[in-house]
Each structure stands twice: as C-alpha cells, then as structure tokens.
Amino acid sequence: MADLSGMWLGTYWQRDTPTRFEATLVQGGNILSGSILDDSDLGEARLSGTVSGRQVRFVKRYLTSNQTAIDYTGTVSEDGNHMAGQWSIPGFDAGPWEAYRSDDDLSASWQTVLEQTFERNLATTAR
C-alpha cells in the first residue's frame, strides 16, 4: 500500500477548465485525511478517505461554502509519486484529476493564503 502522506500539487478539470490545487495529506494505515487549497474562489477544503493498495478514494468538502461533497477516486502510480482518476458530484458534474508529490515546503504559502482569507472574511463581517 502506498503512503500518500505529504504535499501534493495537482489539477482537476471541470468542463475542460483546469483548476490547480495544493494538498497536504496525512495517512494512518489505510485512512487518509488532509486539506486542499484550490486556486479558485472556492478556497480551502477538507478531505477524508481511504487507500487500498494503489486505489485511493476520498471526499472533499469546502470550508467556505455550503457545497455538496465531491467524491474522488483514483489510482496511485507504482512509485507512489503520482495519482490520477475521476471526481464527481453525483447527479451534477464529473471530470478528471491528477496530482504529483511535491518536495516544496508550501507551509508558508498556505499560511499566507489562510491569513488573507481570514482578513477578507473579518472585513466582510465588520461591514
């Protein structure tokens, strides 16, 4: 079974439009959890799922909106550094996705984005 813990950079496509994302994954046994930050207005999401052999399944839920859960299924490469598959919102839409393991320390970038989001939300609430 692949260990998917770590930083990942990826892309998902919705109606032929790509959206980049950064993911921080934590795996304990076959249980997968983590955070995803989309390069879009949807922002940060949490994920939870499972890993079985080279198969990965997880559900993504955005923090900033009341969106339906998004199901992801995929296959991990033999070397454990790439995964790809399909995402779907049942009854609505679906498309492909892929991600590559990243050696970059993206913690500083995450912190900056989260602080900016917090400040925007605080400013909006104060109005």
Image: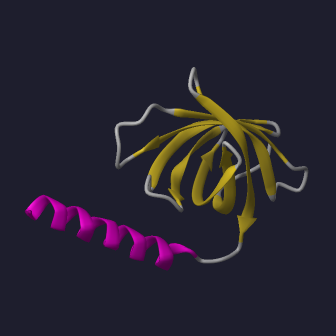
- Foreground: 66 or 5? 66
Asked whether 95 falls inside the magenta stretch, the response is no
Q: Residue furthest right?
A: 78
Classified by dominant secondary structure, the portion drawn in magenta counts as helix
Location of residue 102 (image quadrant): bottom right
Location of residue 91 (image quadrant): top right
Can residue 54 be spotted in the picture? yes
- Count of numbered marks: 0
**Residue segment shown in magenta:** 106-127
Quarter of the C terminus within the rendering: bottom left
Asked whether 112 falls inside the magenta stretch, the response is yes
Can residue 87 be spotted in the picture? no
Residue at point 45%, 31% (across, down): 68
Q: In x, y percent, where is residue 6?
A: 64, 62
Quarter of the N terminus within the rendering: top right
Lateral position of residue 82 relative to residue 15, left or right: right
Q: Residue furthest top?
A: 91
Q: In x, y percent, where is residue 63?
A: 37, 47
Q: In x, y percent, where is residue 72?
A: 65, 36
Lateral position of residue 79 relative to residue 14, left or right: right
Residue at point 35%, 43% (across, down): 65
Q: How is the image coloured?
A: secondary structure
- Foreground: 66 or 82? 66
Lateral position of residue 53 relative to residue 93, left or right: right
Q: Is residue 103 above or below residue 22?
A: below
Q: Is residue 115 above or below residue 30?
A: below
Residue at point 23%, 62% (across, down): 121
Q: Is residue 14 above or below residue 36?
A: above
Q: In x, y percent, where is residue 124?
A: 17, 62
Q: Residue furthest left?
A: 127
Location of residue 50 (image quadrant): top right
